[in-house]
């Protein structure tokens, strides 16, 4: 394979071991989309924390990208966050308030 076809990026070296901000995910994908490689492997080694907002934006940006994005070395915590966000995207549930009796305290 040509070197231009594949690229591996260690996300902690580009961003941080703590992935917290939505804008960081946007900036990260802006950088990825500028690369000449068609397939990008994102290595999650040493990621200590990933916020729900980062995970959500990462997933949204990945869907928009024309690159083939692969993830490797994902910890259980990061995997669980990705799964939680994907589940909420598939089944968005609205808070429904059921009418209830009004109790007056005196």
Image (spheres, rainbow, N blue to C red):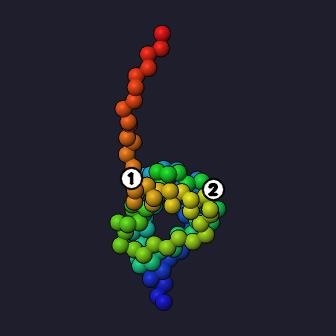
Residue 8 at x, y percent in the picture: 53, 74
Left or right: where 78 falls relative to 90: right
Quadrant of residue 90 within the rendered picture: bottom left
Q: Earlier in the sequence, mark 1 or mark 2?
A: 2
Q: Where in the figure is residue 59, as x and y percent of width and height?
A: 43, 62
Q: Which mark is residue 92?
A: 1
Tell me the element at label 1.
Answer: loop
The answer to whether marks 1 and 2 mark residues whose Cβ atoms lie closer than 8 Å is no
User: Seen from this angle, which residue lies furthest bottom?
Assistant: 1
Work out whether residue 32 can be spotted. yes
Q: Is residue 63 left or right of residue 70?
A: left
Residue 24 visible in this rendered orientation of the protein: no
Residue 48, numbered circle: 2
Residue at x-position 57% and y-position 71%: 72
On the image, the x and y values in percent for residue 78 come to 57, 60
Disc 1 packing (10 Å; few <14; some 14–19; many ≥20):
few
Residue 103 image-quadrant placement: top left
Q: Nearer the viewer, residue 90 or 25?
A: 90
- Look at the picture and state if 68 lies above or below 50: below
Local secondary structure at mark 2: loop
Task: Give the number of the disc on residue 10.
Answer: none
Q: Residues within 10 Å of mark 2 (few under 14, many from 20)?
A: some
Q: Residue furthest top?
A: 106
Point 61% across, 58% down: residue:
77
């Amino acid at each position: 394979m040509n070197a231009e076809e594949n690229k591996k990026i260690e996300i902690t070296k580009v961003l941080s071991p703590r992935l917290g901000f939505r804008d960081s995910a946007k900036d990260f994908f802006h950088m990825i989309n500028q690369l000449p490689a068609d397939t990008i492997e994102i290595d999650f080694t040493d990621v200590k924390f990933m916020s729900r907002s980062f995970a959500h934006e990462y997933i949204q940006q990945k869907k928009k990208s024309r690159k083939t994005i692969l993830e490797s070395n994902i910890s259980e915590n990061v995997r669980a966050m990705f799964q939680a966000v994907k589940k909420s995207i598939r089944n968005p549930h609205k808070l429904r308030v059921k009418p209830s009796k009004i109790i007056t305290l005196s």
